[in-house]
Amino acid sequence: MRKTIIAGNWKMNNTASQGVALVKAIAPLVEDAECDVVVCVPAIDIPAVGEALKGTKIALGAQNVHFAEKGAYTGEISASMLKEYGVQYVIIGHSERRQYFGETDETVNKRTLAALAAGLTPIVCIGESLEERETGKTESVLAKQIEEGFKGIEDIKKIVVAYEPIWAIGTGRTATAEQANETIGFIRRKIGEMFCPKCAENVRIQYGGSMNAGNCKELMAMPEIDGGLIGGASLKAPDFAAIVHYNK
Ligand code: 13P
């Protein structure tokens, strides 16, 4: 049985004090959560939000991690720096980082291996653009992201995969539940071929892209979908809590 994981990706939203206020509003609403609940916050919010999360059901996540242990990488943050503040999860290879900050499958791979070595759970994002979907390239694009991004992972069930079709992110245009289920099924088969079919059965694969309180139930009812990576709707306590309670 794969345990559902609902994670918020705040992106570049919320100062530390706003973040603290938000998690204080979310925490009582998700006290009875049956799934794993995570908030992935801006790096500078980590100390304050981490403190506010103590004693709650919500785990702390970051939005990126560098692959080196330390050194001359101005502006970057290492896994041990995240760990010291109680960070458990880290998003890696979000399409916005691939698009605006030169992230490649190779750097995604290096960050993922570094996160795993430090005992963090990577949430590795993959997904196709609208043009790639419309020209029938979805599966080949995802296969390449998996082959190159997941190379060398010893225990594949230690990562969480987030399938985020780029055309569904922040657009209000969500993939249909069937589309998301079918594509996540493909991702699982591909992971099975690369590692082993049984290992793939234990990998949690989230859907991300305009998931909200209204559509989460239908998406989450799909057998291949093990959770959500939520952008916009994670910034409002009642909306995020409603997604955590998708089955209520
Ligand atoms: P939205 O939920 O705002 O579409 O963002 C999805 C996302 O990119 C989560 O990482």
Image (cartoon, rainbow, N blue to C red):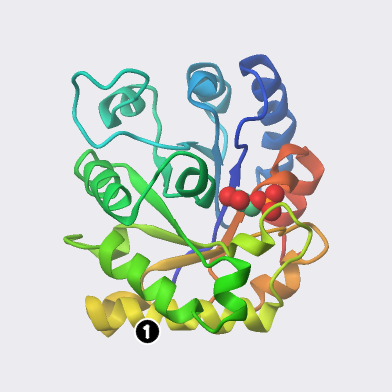
Q: Is residue 93 above or below residue 163?
A: above
Q: Is residue 80 above or below residue 95?
A: above
Relative side of 7 to 104, left or right: right
Label 1 CA crowd tier, 10 Å (few <14, some 14–19, many 20+): some
Q: For the image shown, how many numbered marks are present on the structure?
A: 1
- What residue is rendered at 63% in x and 69% in y? 130
Q: Is residue 130 above or below residue 69?
A: below
Q: Can you see residue 33?
A: no
Q: Can you see residue 181?
A: yes
User: Along the line of sight, which residue is nearer the eye, 172 or 178?
Assistant: 172
- What residue is rendered at 67% in x and 25% in y? 14
Relative side of 173 to 158, left or right: right
x, y (%) of residue 217? 74, 69
- Pointer 1 residue: 189
Q: Is residue 132 above or below residue 100?
A: below
Q: Quadrant of the N terminus?
A: bottom left
User: Along the line of sight, which residue is nearer the eye, 194 or 21?
Assistant: 194
- What residue is rendered at 29% in x and 44% in y? 111
x, y (%) of residue 244? 67, 54
Secondary element under disc 1, as helix, strand or loop, is helix
Relative side of 187 to 66, left or right: right
- What residue is rendered at 67% in x and 15% in y? 17
Q: Quadrant of the C terminus?
A: bottom right
Relative side of 240 to 110, left or right: right
x, y (%) of residue 146? 33, 68
Q: Quadrant of the rendered structure where residue 237 is?
A: top right
Q: Is mark 1 within 8 Å of ligand 1?
A: no
Badge 1 amino acid: Arg
x, y (%) of residue 210? 72, 58
Q: Quadrant of the rendered structure where residue 201 is?
A: bottom left
